[in-house]
Amino acid sequence: MEKQTHILVRKIQLYIDCDNTEQRRAYYSTLFEWQSLVFRGSNLVFTHQYVQERICDFIYLQDDIRLKLSSRKKDEQGIFTTSRLNTTYQLLSHYFKGQVPAKILTSLNVSAVKCFNQHRVAYWKGERSLSTSKRDVPIPFSGFDMKFRRDADSKEFKFTLFKIPFRTYLGKDRGSKRKLLEKATSGQIKICGSSLQILKGKIFLLLSLEMPKIQHALEPYVIAEASLSLEYPITVLIDRDNYRIGTKEEFLYQRLAIQAARNRLQKAASFARGGHGRKRKTKGLTNFDDKEKRYVENRLHNYSRKLIDICIKAGAGTLLLTNQTAREERAAEERFVLRNWSYYGLIQKIKYKAEMAGIEVIVE
């Protein structure tokens, strides 16, 4: 039976809700320490799960060692003293107990094992290398550990997580995040396992919410055929109606213009006035940090949103991406196309929005 809900993730900036400077610094220090330990713990879980999965390939071990990956309590040939999921939790508890809250270790173990299981077949076939976590890895926690409350004075939201007080900063929010937080505060929607991420000294909440799916009048036999290309990002054909979403001038040329502008600034940096070393000379480049990435993400979101809106309006319950595999193989041979055509990100956004709308996506 198809699920009637989906998980929605929103990124919200946070501030530590404390006026005492020394106490605020202590909170920051604690968060940085937790992030470092979560980084190490996540990689440990991936490593041990992989070794457990591939221990049967260790042909240089004795035969009586390469037994079943199960608890000896349930199977005589099992080599574990507990369940497989609990093995890596015991590992995390052994190394980090007392340094990180136990609830964080539990959420870390569950999320890391779930991520490993998603790609375990690719690991087994040798088609994918083992995942590794970055140092800015989010700090996971359960949705039960956080409860929002509304601040009447600032109209922001506050919550306490592991004895650290936080308050949200919604900025120029157009209402979507605020409305979601209001529903989460009143209990209308469920808060799922979320995480905290520290990026360049700023704290962000990656809030996961369980939302009911919006029911649309869709027919599975109505098929929308979509074609992705660099010339036109998306071309859609539904019956006799043909739509084009985006143009080459809008997407590619603007992207190349951003690249060219950054290259000009980079070349001119050597002639910039010094005084504080590299930071002074490359000051102009800071405005272009991730500018191309943000532009591309915005365009892909708009393109995928328009595509799903067209499918919903036409009542198409099936979305077929035609000849996509062949196009990706040709793109891999051309460096320019591979660098500037973000087909993978576009497909992921299309699948995500299609799932929310109840549309089946088939990649041909």
Image (cartoon, rainbow, N blue to C red):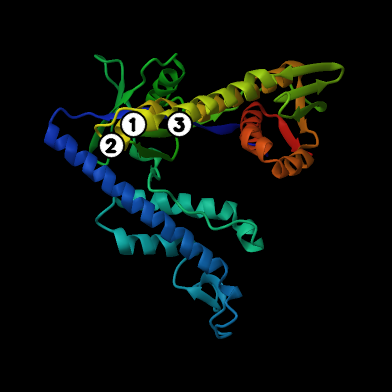
Between 341 and 202, the one nearer to me in the picture: 341
Q: Which mark is residue 281?
A: 1
Quadrant of the image for the C terminus?
A: top right
Circle 2 residues within 10 Å: few <14, some 14–19, many ≥20: few
Which residue is labeled 2 in the image? 277
For label 3, the residue is: 267
Cβ atoms at labels 1 and 2 below 8 Å apart? yes
110 versus 277 height, above or below: below
Q: Residue at x 28, y 58 (%)?
A: 97
Total labels drawn: 3
69 sits left or right of 304 in the view = left
> Could you say where residue 155 lies in the image, as x and y percent from the top left?
30, 15
The residues bearing labels 1 and 3 have C-alpha atoms spaced at a distance of: 11 Å
**Element class at badge 2:** loop
CA gap, disc 3 and disc 2: 16 Å
* For residue 74, above or below residue 331: below
Front one among 261 and 97: 261
The residue sitting at the front extreme is: 271
Asked if labels 3 and 1 touch by Cβ distance under 8 angstroms, the answer is: no
Specify which label sits upstream in the sequence, 3 or 2: 3
Residue 150 quadrant: top left
Cα–Cα span, label 1 and label 2? 7 Å
> In the figure, is residue 256 to the left or right of 359?
left
- Can residue 253 be spotted in the picture? yes
- Residue in the image at 47% along x and 65% along y: 48
The amino acid at mark 1 is Lys
Q: Is residue 295 left or right of residue 353?
A: left
Measuring from the top left, give residue 317's x and y in whole percent: 75, 27
Q: Is residue 289 visible?
A: no
Mark 3, other Cα within 10 Å: few <14 / some 14–19 / many ≥20: few
